[in-house]
Amino acid sequence: MYRKLRNKSGKLDERSAEQRAIDDWIPISSSRNAKWWFSAFHNVTAMVGAGVLSFPYAMGPGVTVLVMSWIITLYTLWQMVEMHEMVPGKRFDRYHELGQHAFGEKLGLWIIVPQQLIVEVGVNIVYMITGGHSLKKFHESVCKDCKNITLIHFIIIFASVHFVLSQLPNFHSVSGVSLAAAIMSLCYSTIAWGASVDKGAVDNVQYGYKGKSTAGTILPFFSALGNIAFGYAGHNVVLEIQSTMPSTPQKPSKGPMWRGVIVAYIIVALCYFPVAIIGYWAFGNTVDDNILISLDKPKWLIAMANMFVVIHLVGSYQLYAMPVFDMIETVLVKKLRFKPSWYLRFVARNTYICIIFGVLLMVVAPIGGLRGIIIKAKHYKFYSGAGTQSDPEAG
């Protein structure tokens, strides 16, 4: 039965009670009471990732590219904020909804959803691995004499946190985690450039390209552009962040959303520019692709920075996973007609982390196997009796 109720904007809401219950359960549409500062720290968490630590390594293209990227992505983010409610009476809460408006119901899904899933699942996989790496670095920094623990075990430890946090229903419920992550990103960025200032420029520092050939110059340049582009990859969840804000014809959501974006981009500048410029000043072209590796002292400070990275990645993972959870749960309850419940959410979301483990194994196992084949092939002796081979890694 349909009940004609009026929503906050005064318009009639002709959805059925069942449809309203489903929309109130699905992550993206379930909460619309966020303030402008939620936009600020959500956008900082989404954008300022551990990639900022590679910016000194990417300073070959120079400060110009870094500043241009900041300006261009701010402009394109403004466009996204404006498009969220460009059709009167309708909100594009999800990227595929905007795609469907532009390309049609079916074609919009086929164009947008695969790209969005590749980006968001891919980022989650990267964050899972990076979180494990940072945990491992923290462990090695604080406990030099402890038993060596493999990277996969640290990835499992990092993943176990998300088995709990992934049960949080929507963006609003992960606000505390996201706020902590935003603060951590500012903290480890400050540690990175502050420790660089304290260390000073290394002896005989050089700022030119290390490569002597044309290829050795151009290819690192392209790689550096990729590092900078990855650092500004926060647009992937901007529509979903804006969907958490209330909106009326008199006070559309773009007002508080844009205010939060401006604050977020000021924080982004405070994180990105000092790390990139000061880190490159201190180490020149010998800087590692993670400046915390170049900064080996003081040990306790670098260990703390790695733990800050871990906490930030926990929050970022949740932000990028939430749109994927929304897709999965929408299909389950709207297409497959499952009843919304906590155990449906528990099974669906925990299965998705497991998927990441499956993908990791799918990628890592062939690499390990290929390495073994290459090593053995180097020492394999044809026509030596029965075709024996010597194993350099045995005994």
Image (tube, helix red, strand yellow):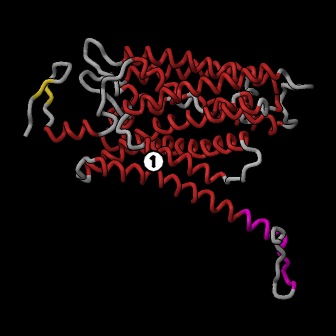
Residue, far top = 250
The quarter holding residue 53 reads top right
Is residue 145 within the magenta segment?
A: no
- Seen in the image, is 92 located left or right of residue 112? left
Is residue 381 within the magenta segment?
A: yes
Residue at image coords 45%, 47%:
163
- Residue 84 or 312: which is nearer the viewer? 312
- Image location of residue 325, percent across then percent down: 38, 44
The answer to whether one can see residue 187 in this image is yes
The quarter holding residue 200 reads top right
- Residue 132 or 242: which is nearer the viewer? 132
If the image is split into quadrants, where does the C terminus sit?
A: bottom right
Residue at image coords 61%, 18%:
269
The answer to whether one can see residue 221 in this image is no
**Span highlighted in magenta in the image:** 371-384
- Residue 292 or 61: which is nearer the viewer? 292
Location of residue 373 with respect to 212 vertically, above or below: below
Location of residue 13 with respect to 161 vertically, above or below: above
- Image location of residue 124, percent across then percent down: 52, 43
If the image is split into quadrants, where does the N terminus sit?
A: top left
Chief SS of the magenta region? helix
- Image location of residue 17, percent across then percent down: 14, 38
Location of residue 81 with respect to 142 vertically, above or below: above
In the picture of the structure, the residue carrying the numbered disc 1 is 163
- Seen in the image, is 182 located left or right of residue 59? left
Query: Mark 1: which secondary structure?
Result: helix
- Image location of residue 155, percent across then percent down: 59, 49
The quarter holding residue 275 reads top right
Residue, far bottom = 385
Q: Amino acid at mark 1?
A: Phe
Binning the other alpha carbons within 10 Å of mark 1 as few (below 14), some (14 to 19) or many (20 upward) gives: some
Location of residue 71 with respect to 145 vertically, above or below: above
